[in-house]
Amino acid sequence: MMIWNRKKLFADSSAEMLAKSCDALKQEGIPYEVKTTTSHGPIRRQLEMKKNIQPRNWAVDYKVYGEEFTHVYYLYVHRTDYARAKSLLSI
């Protein structure tokens, strides 16, 4: 699926929600793609890898409210399947 032919169905940090959604799309025959990233972003991950340190929640370290280090799952479907997939998942 080419990047310009897909549309983001949702972004969530719940692996359970992702699994249920993928199963529902698979049963209906709707092709999908999943992109996984972390809540810290690519620049911060690169810095952590270069410094060879463990990922940590810098927001808490600096007394700012923030999330713990989590994965964010992006679920994409083809543009022509978007309406059907959205109604199937009741988003």
Image (tube, grey):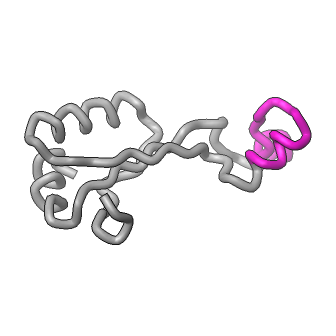
- x, y percentage for residue 43? 75, 55
Q: For residue 38, what is the image quadrant?
A: top right
17 or 59: which is nearer to us?
Answer: 17
Quarter of the image that includes the N terminus: bottom left
- Left or right of 90: which side holds 66? right
- x, y percentage for residue 63? 82, 45
63 or 81: which is nearer to us?
Answer: 81
47 or 20: which is nearer to us?
Answer: 47
Residue at 25%, 37% in the rendered image: 22
Instruction: Residue 69: say if magenta.
Output: no
Q: Residue furthest bottom?
A: 4
- Left or right of 13: which side holds 76? left
Instruction: Residue 58: say if magenta.
Output: yes
Query: Count of labels shown?
Result: 0
Q: What is the magenta range? A: 45-63
41 or 1: which is nearer to us?
Answer: 1
- Left or right of 14: which side holds 82? left
- Left or right of 67: which side holds 78? left
Residue at 67%, 45% in the rendered image: 66
User: Height in image: 33 above or below 14?
Assistant: below
Q: Residue furthest right?
A: 51
Q: Residue furthest front?
A: 2
User: Height in image: 39 above or below 78?
Assistant: above
Q: For residue 34, what is the image quadrant?
A: top left
Residue at 26%, 55% in the rendered image: 77
